[in-house]
Image (tube, rainbow, N blue to C red):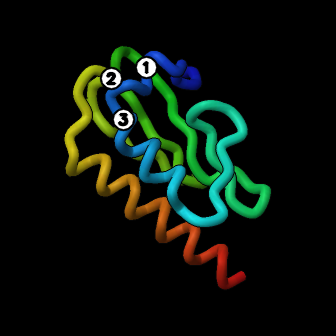
């Protein structure tokens, strides 16, 4: 399993744009997001599947070429949950 390349993240561009709008999120490299200096979200690709790593949690989003809106929403909700938890630390 390796980090997803930018061309493999085209199918989740709406998700990426939504994450970029979260206050305090920084994108150091394309598709690698940080909050308060700690990694909060990045993506992996393996055998044509795309995975989101949200802190220590791995979520299978689907095929690189087709990720459902439902899975992108689930991922965004998890990111927002983790960001909210960190804001209160």
Q: Do the residues labelled 3 and 1 touch (CB within 8 Å)?
A: no
Q: Distance between the residues labelled 3 and 1?
A: 9 Å
Residue drawn at x 66%, y 84% is: 88
Q: Residues within 10 Å of mark 1 (few under 14, many from 20)?
A: some
Q: Do the residues labelled 1 and 2 touch (CB within 8 Å)?
A: yes
Q: Circle 1 is placed at which residue position?
A: 8
Task: Determine whether, in the image, residue 23 is placed left or right of residue 12.
Answer: right
Q: Quadrant of the C terminus?
A: bottom right
Residue drawn at x 37%, y 15% is: 47
SS under mark 2: loop
> Residue 2 lies in what quarter of the image?
top right
Residue drawn at x 56%, y 76% is: 84
Q: Do the residues labelled 2 and 3 touch (CB within 8 Å)?
A: no
Q: How crowded is mark 2: few (under 14 residues within 10 Å), some or many (20 or more)?
A: many
Q: How far apart are marks 2 and 3 (CA)?
A: 9 Å
Q: Circle 2 is placed at which residue position?
A: 64
SS under mark 3: helix
Q: Is residue 81 above or below residue 9?
A: below
Task: Determine whether, in the image, residue 27 is placed left or right of residue 72.
Answer: right
Task: Say whether disc 2 or disc 3 marks the residue closer to the N-terminus.
Answer: 3
Q: Specify the farthest residue to the right.
A: 37
**Residue 6: x, y in percent?**
52, 21
**Residue 45: x, y in percent?**
46, 23
> Residue 83 lies in what quarter of the image?
bottom right
Residue drawn at x 54%, y 19% is: 5
Q: Residues within 10 Å of mark 3 (few under 14, many from 20)?
A: many
SS under mark 1: helix
**Residue 25: x, y in percent?**
63, 57
Q: Circle 3 is placed at which residue position?
A: 12
Q: In this view, does 45 lie above or below 27?
A: above
Task: Determine whether, in the image, residue 66 is placed left or right of residue 19.
Answer: left
Task: Determine whether, in the image, residue 39 is placed left or right of residue 5.
Answer: right
């Amino acid at each position: 399993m390796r980090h997803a390349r930018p061309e493999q993240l085209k199918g989740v561009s709406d998700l990426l744009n939504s994450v970029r709008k979260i206050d305090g999120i920084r994108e150091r490299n394309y598709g690698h997001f940080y909050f308060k200096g700690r990694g909060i979200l990045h993506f992996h690709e393996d055998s044509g599947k795309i995975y989101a790593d949200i802190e220590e949690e791995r979520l299978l989003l689907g095929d690189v070429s087709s990720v459902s809106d439902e899975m992108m929403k689930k991922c965004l909700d998890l990111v927002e949950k983790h960001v909210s938890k960190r804001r209160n630390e």
